[in-house]
Image: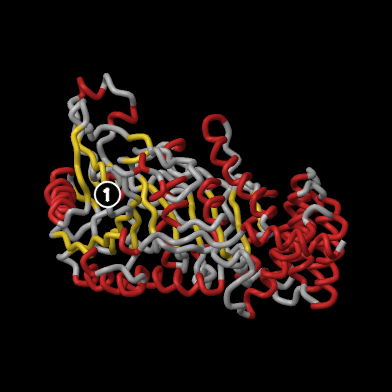
Amino acid sequence: MLIRISLLLAALYSTLQARPSIDPTSVVIVYNTNNAESSKLAFYYARQRSIPDENIVGLDTPDKGHISRAEYISTIQNPLRRQFQNKVWWKLAKTADGIILPLENKKRLLVCMYGVPFGILQQKIPKEESDKMHITQRANSAAVDSELAVLGIQGVPIQGPLPNKYFKKDYAFSSQRELTPYFMVGRIDGPDFATSKRLIDDAIATEKQGLWGMCYLDIALKGGAYKIGDEWLKNIDKLNWQKGIPTTVDNNKQTYLSNYPMRDVSLYYGWYTSTVNGPFRNPDFEFKRGAVAIHLHSFSASNLRDKNKHWVGPLLYKGAAATVGNVYEPYLQMTHYFDILNDRLIDGYTFIEAASMAIPVLSWQNVAIGDPLYQPFKRLDGTGVIEEEDKFYRSINLTFNAWKSYAKQLKTKLTAGAINKNDARYYEVLGLWNLHSGDSKQALAQFSYAAKKYTTSSDKVRIALHLANIYVGEKKKNLAVGTLEEALIGRQKHTSGRPLKSMLNILNPPPPPAAEPRKKLTPKN
């Protein structure tokens, strides 16, 4: 058996060799000449990623987030096209139907820096025209980045989206001639210069040791046309366990509770509320360095430079290194498919390749923020600098990859790890894995072991929430309430008790306040 497992691991790791990064000479950096920090960030990024200075382009564009279509054309689109023409970065030709597009294109990735506008405002359409259009064709608003993806294609209408030929593909962007007219477009941006610079530093640092930790998924339990969003998250849950990435799933209708005690968050995918909430508003919350964190909402990136509003800005401010979002309403089927993005990241692609393969349309509302060249799972093959904080997750990954086809042996190995290391995290992971596998009885047992072994209040509260959620799923409300009330003892006035109180209020909503007695009217004489 040991020989067989050794051979399996050797075969596995031979398929997990990191994919090559994007050629730095094919990258163009775009910054705003009216913002000194934009210029500073552009040259810093070029040095960190060995991108030639001649590939850095400054544009005299308004120093604000949202601009008009006319401003986009005059200060971004046309000047950038002139740069490509003057530097002979592309060779243009005209098609039979009058469309101008590149036949040759030396540059494949555009990177917008902090300070470059990110939104093109809606241009008014006469009502008699808009009434005849499909709802998506009425939109001529767009994310600047998504519009730049078709920078080389001249003569197409600005109304509505264009299909993305790279959607759902599984190969390097530069390897296919049919993609020559298009660009991948990324953005290094955020609430402030310091946050934007950190995206670069965190990406480079994480690539040396790899991204290791927990994944948290927040399923919204949507139905009808919105069901696809939950399906993306379920697919992520399935793939993560196959790859040895422990995953916690919130199956409640509400988002993760306020002060929910997440730990070692390396991946987060969720939906659906308009403004950041739950644990991400906790003053002490911070993502693991290099984390990919994404929350789906129609306007998640509409003000990405605000650390308190919507989702993109707050997630980046809390330490995430990469995210995607929407500047304006995209409609669910035309936003990033989270499961494709997650799959391509784990497969070793760069962040921008994964994000580009996950979006079905271009010239639309979507942005990808973070170092585009970042490869978070570059070390999933077991290589890289082994840091103390990662040893547990490397061990979990190795164990799952070796024994995932042998449930009994996997349980034995993880239990042995829990005993030998006296580490409650092994029991918690076992409980999550059993829950994923549909064995709630075993999950209850493993979580109960974890509760006894954990020593910190936040960990004990999280386990109590795991247990209560299982009981709720089994329609054993009394057991759920009892578990939460027991865990709340001694924590009523502490922040760690807040998620327990919140869940208790969901299970047993407090009665509405008594109505004030009506005042008697005094008749006028």
Which residue is at a point 80% across and 73% down the rendered structure image?
A: 453
Which residue is at a point 47% across and 65% down the rendered structure image?
A: 320
- Relative image position of residue 295 (x, y in whole percent): 48, 52
**Image quadrant containing the N terminus:** bottom right
- Relative image position of residue 157 (x, y in whole percent): 22, 32
* Image-quadrant location for residue 127: top left
Which residue corresponds to mark 1?
A: 105
Is residue 295 visible to us here?
yes
* Image-quadrant location for residue 427: bottom right
Total number of numbered discs in the rendering: 1
**Residue 487 vertical position relative to residue 44 in the rendered view, above or below:** above
Return the residue nearer the eye: 392 or 65. 392
**Image quadrant containing the C terminus:** top left
Which residue is at a point 35% across and 56% down the rendered structure image?
A: 186
Secondary structure at badge 1 equals strand
Q: Specify whether 145 is left or right of 493.
A: left
Disc 1 crowd, CA 10 A, few/some/many (<14, 14-19, 20+): many
Q: Specify whether 455 is left or right of 441.
A: left
Q: Specify whether 459 is left or right of 269.
A: right
**Residue 320 vertical position relative to residue 339 in the rendered view, above or below:** below
